[in-house]
């Protein structure tokens, strides 16, 4: 993977690839949300991408969101994409647009409590471990419907879709079934018509696999390296 140091060039390349993959799946580039994953990237370089109109930023550490938060305008949408410890929810509840990594009821309970205190309804995605890798966080696909049923009872939480992190494969034939599996699960969940739950977003696809993810139905991709270079 060749990474240009010029963020604008990288961005244009990524946009081209999004456009191409979206067309392959009968959609338009505008239907895909690009989250620029800004973890470990310094504020000045992140501003290069926000100045191009990319307002969705992804971080996987609570502390980093808190440190960077005040340097960006209120229009910036922060996404918590990494594992979230229950005791840290309070620091980001008023800052993030979406939490992508909800995979256990204790975490949901804490989000409910803090969102209620803040007077907010928190949009979340349920993280699913489609590949079954033991090292991965996320809920088992077979448990997802029950889990989401439980989440639907929390008045200050709104489930908006699913998220997954695919294992690293050397080619797309490994990754594709993972993405296809998450899409199928989202369709199944949608068919359950659970109140307070929508499957508007499928957050899947990173630098090395976002084109395949889009071809398989992703509408929210999380791209770091291909925009900012190697971390
Ligand atoms: C770091 C990270 C990404 C972005 O990874 P790249 O390969 O740099 O695009 C996406 N999603 C999650 C959950 C991450 O932690």
Image: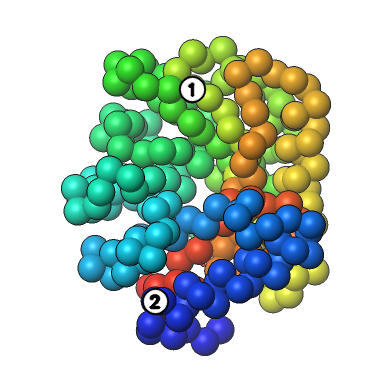
Q: Is mark 1 within 8 Å of ligand 1?
A: no
Q: Say which of 173 and 186 sits in front.
A: 186
Q: Is residue 179 visible?
A: no
Closer to us: mark 2 or mark 1?
2
Q: Position of residue 39 (x, y in %)?
A: 36, 60
Question: Is 123 situated above or below 135?
Answer: above
Residue 47 place in picture, x, y as percent: 28, 64
Q: Earlier in the sequence, mark 2 or mark 1?
A: 2
Q: Is residue 126 above or below residue 28?
A: above
Q: Can residue 117 be seen here?
A: yes
The location of residue 199, given as percent across then percent down, is 67, 34
Q: Report the residue at 51% width, 75% height from top.
A: 12
What label does residue 7 carry, if any?
A: 2
| Residue 183, percent from left and from top | 75, 45
Q: Quadrant of residue 48?
A: bottom left
Which residue is depicted at the point 79% across and 57% down? Answer: 26
Residue in the image at 73% along x and 37% along y: 186
Q: Write down the residue under mark 1.
A: 157
In this rendering, the count of numbered labels is 2
Residue at 42%, 59% in the rendered image: 54
Question: Which element type, helix, strand or loop, lies under badge 1?
Answer: strand
């Amino acid at each position: 993977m060749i990474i240009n140091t010029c963020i604008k060039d990288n961005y244009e390349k990524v946009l081209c690839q999004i456009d191409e993959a979206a067309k392959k799946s009968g959609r338009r580039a505008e239907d895909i949300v690009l989250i620029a994953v800004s973890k470990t990237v310094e504020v000045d370089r992140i501003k290069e991408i926000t100045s191009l109109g990319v307002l969705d930023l992804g971080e996987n550490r609570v502390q980093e969101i808190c440190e960077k938060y005040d340097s960006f305008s209120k229009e910036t949408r922060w996404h918590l994409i990494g594992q979230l410890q229950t005791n840290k929810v309070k620091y980001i509840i008023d800052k993030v647009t979406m939490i992508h990594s909800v995979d256990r009821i204790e975490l949901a309970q804490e989000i409910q409590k803090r969102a209620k205190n803040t007077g907010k309804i928190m949009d979340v995605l349920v993280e699913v471990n489609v590949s079954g890798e033991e090292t991965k966080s996320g809920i088992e696909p077979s448990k997802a419907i029950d889990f989401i049923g439980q989440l639907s009872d929390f008045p200050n939480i709104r489930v908006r879709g699913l998220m997954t992190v695919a294992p690293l494969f050397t080619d797309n034939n490994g990754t594709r079934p993972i993405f296809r599996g998450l899409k199928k699960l989202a369709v199944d969940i949608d068919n359950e018509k659970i109140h307070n739950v929508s499957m508007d977003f499928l957050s899947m696809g990173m630098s090395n696999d976002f084109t395949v993810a889009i071809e398989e139905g992703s509408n929210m991709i999380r791209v770091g390296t291909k925009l900012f270079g190697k971390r």
